């Protein structure tokens, strides 16, 4: 590419990332808004026990998030790489193979829930007691899992759009799905229908919007990428699957390190401390969520830039996103340290005895978490997955042990202090040391990659990284 073409491409990547981030924020606002409307309506219609049953069923989504085995993220890297090489055929093979893989997972989930549906004591599992709740527990759970499973193959269009740096299309369809879910819930309530119908309406809205997104994108906008069974490749499925395993292991490591906070607090300080810690952490997590909306689109952009050997853009994007994210988290964390007591009182309509040291510790951890997420987009997009796993083998046990050690001595602030200290020691410092080598290995003139091989035919930048 000429210098002018590189400049134009660089500007286009940043423009698409900004548009995708802005539409993601809009979609999230609409999702939160529909939730605020849906919750009181459903609570009034269902009553406390059945509403609690619905919320419990919804929480299963955190477990089902692992059900795609990282295949979606594997597709994203492959698509971004092929897009950078202008290889339409490779993109279509990847999409077709991904649809077959996720379609198979979808079928397995549906067969599984239908097989155990009549065998499991749903009322005891969810600890419900009223006759209506007992009768609705099993059907509601089955409907929820089936909707989730049906969405998996359709969701490949989201990975394709992200890989093509057109994630704004998916965000707008998610907005439509949130509104459709709200309309469905209101309609079900007006018709005096039971919990399974409300679950179907709430989960079916996003499912319908994703299906419509796939239909319009493959039929009208990008028919050249339309999935086909004939285009599916066993070799392609093999590479996507093996890359997906790496992403799945990363997800599991992150869940183990950070989703255990409330369990540790409950064990050592009691349930009351969990309430205080969780609401404070939830407030600061908004900064992490907001940052993720805007740095997330850089993941496929890095992959595409690497395939085009545009290392100058990779370095520029990494420096700019890192500086902006750190500044955003630093200023936002400082503001929350000052305003958190007031904001929590307005939110909860009550005072909570939360030490200011916890706010300060959460602010520091938030800056590190935001910076880490921003750097992770660079690592994911440049296919440096295995190095993240290698560091997580050290970080996760060290983080858990430090949390147990510090909470018994410093109380609630010990949790974010432990996260911050171990993250700096076992993640941030090694990355700073390895960064020159990571950037140097971004040069890629070969047409394909395999995350488990360093062969000439399947170049891999993330294994056996030489120390700078």
Image (tube, grey):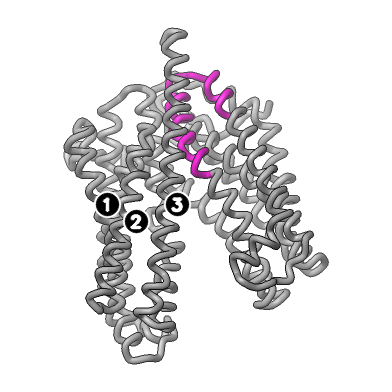
Q: Looking at the image, is 390 positioned above or below residue 51?
A: above
Residue 293 drawn at (x, y percent): 49, 43
Q: Quadrant of the C terminus?
A: top right
- Label 3 Cα neighbours within 10 Å, binned few <14 / some 14-19 / many ≥20: few
Q: Looking at the image, is 63 positioned above or below residue 304?
A: below
Q: Is residue 243 left or right of residue 153?
A: right
Q: Which residues are magenta?
A: 292-318
The residue pinned by badge 2 equals: 178
**SS of the residue under disc 2:** helix
Marks 2 and 3, the one that precedes in the sequence: 3
- Label 2 Cα neighbours within 10 Å, binned few <14 / some 14-19 / many ≥20: many
Can the viewer see residue 21? yes
Residue at the image position 45 percent from the left and 33 percent from the top: 17
- Report the Cα–Cα distance between label 1 and label 2: 9 Å
Residue 8 badge: none
Q: Is residue 1 left or right of residue 286?
A: left
- 186 or 5, which lies in front? 186
Is residue 308 a member of the stretch shown in magenta?
yes
- 238 or 49, which lies in front? 49
The residue pinned by badge 3 equals: 29
């Amino acid at each position: 590419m000429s210098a002018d073409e590189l400049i134009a491409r660089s500007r286009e990547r940043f423009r698409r990332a900004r548009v995708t981030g802005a539409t993601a924020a809009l979609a999230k606002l609409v999702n939160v808004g529909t939730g605020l409307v849906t919750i009181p309506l459903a609570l009034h219609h269902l009553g406390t026990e059945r509403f609690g049953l619905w919320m419990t069923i919804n929480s299963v989504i955190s477990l089902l998030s692992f059900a795609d085995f990282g295949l979606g993220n594997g597709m994203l890297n492959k698509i971004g790489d092929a897009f950078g090489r202008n290889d339409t055929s490779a993109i279509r093979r990847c999409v077709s193979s991904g649809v077959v893989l996720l379609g198979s997972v979808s079928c397995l989930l549906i067969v599984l829930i239908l097989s155990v549906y009549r065998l499991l004591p749903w009322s005891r599992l969810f600890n419900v007691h009223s006759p209506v709740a007992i009768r609705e527990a099993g059907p509601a759970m089955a409907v929820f899992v089936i909707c989730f499973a049906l969405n998996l193959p359709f969701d490949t269009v989201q990975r394709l759009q992200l890989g093509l740096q057109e994630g704004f299309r998916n965000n707008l369809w998610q907005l439509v799905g949130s509104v459709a879910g709200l309309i469905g819930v209101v309609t079900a309530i007006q018709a005096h229908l039971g919990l399974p119908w409300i679950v179907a309406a709430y989960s079916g809205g996003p499912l319908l919007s994703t299906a419509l997104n796939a239909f319009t994108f493959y039929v009208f906008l990008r028919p050249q990428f339309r999935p086909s069974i004939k285009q599916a490749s066993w070799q392609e499925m093999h590479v996507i699957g093996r890359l997906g395993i790496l992403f799945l292991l990363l997800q599991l490591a992150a869940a183990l390190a950070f989703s255990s906070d409330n369990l540790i607090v409950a064990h050592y300080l009691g349930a009351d401390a969990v309430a205080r810690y969780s609401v404070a952490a939830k407030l600061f997590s908004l900064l992490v969520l907001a940052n993720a909306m805007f740095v997330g689109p850089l993941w496929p952009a890095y992959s595409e830039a690497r395939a085009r050997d545009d290392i100058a853009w990779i370095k520029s994007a990494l420096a700019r996103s890192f500086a902006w994210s750190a500044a955003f988290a630093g200023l936002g964390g400082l503001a929350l340290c000052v305003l958190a007591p007031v904001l929590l009182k307005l939110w909860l309509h009550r005072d909570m005895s939360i030490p200011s040291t916890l706010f300060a510790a959460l602010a520091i951890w938030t800056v590190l978490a935001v910076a880490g997420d921003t750097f992770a987009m660079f690592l994911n997009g440049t296919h440096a997955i295995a190095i993240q796993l290698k560091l997580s083998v050290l970080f996760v046990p060290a983080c858990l042990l430090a949390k147990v050690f510090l909470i018994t001595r410093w109380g609630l602030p010990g949790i974010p202090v432990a996260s911050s200290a171990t993250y700096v020691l076992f993640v941030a410092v090694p990355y700073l040391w390895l960064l020159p080598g990571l950037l140097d290995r971004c040069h890629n003139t070969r047409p394909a990659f395999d995350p488990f091989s360093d062969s000439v035919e399947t170049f891999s930048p993330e294994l056996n990284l030489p120390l700078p």
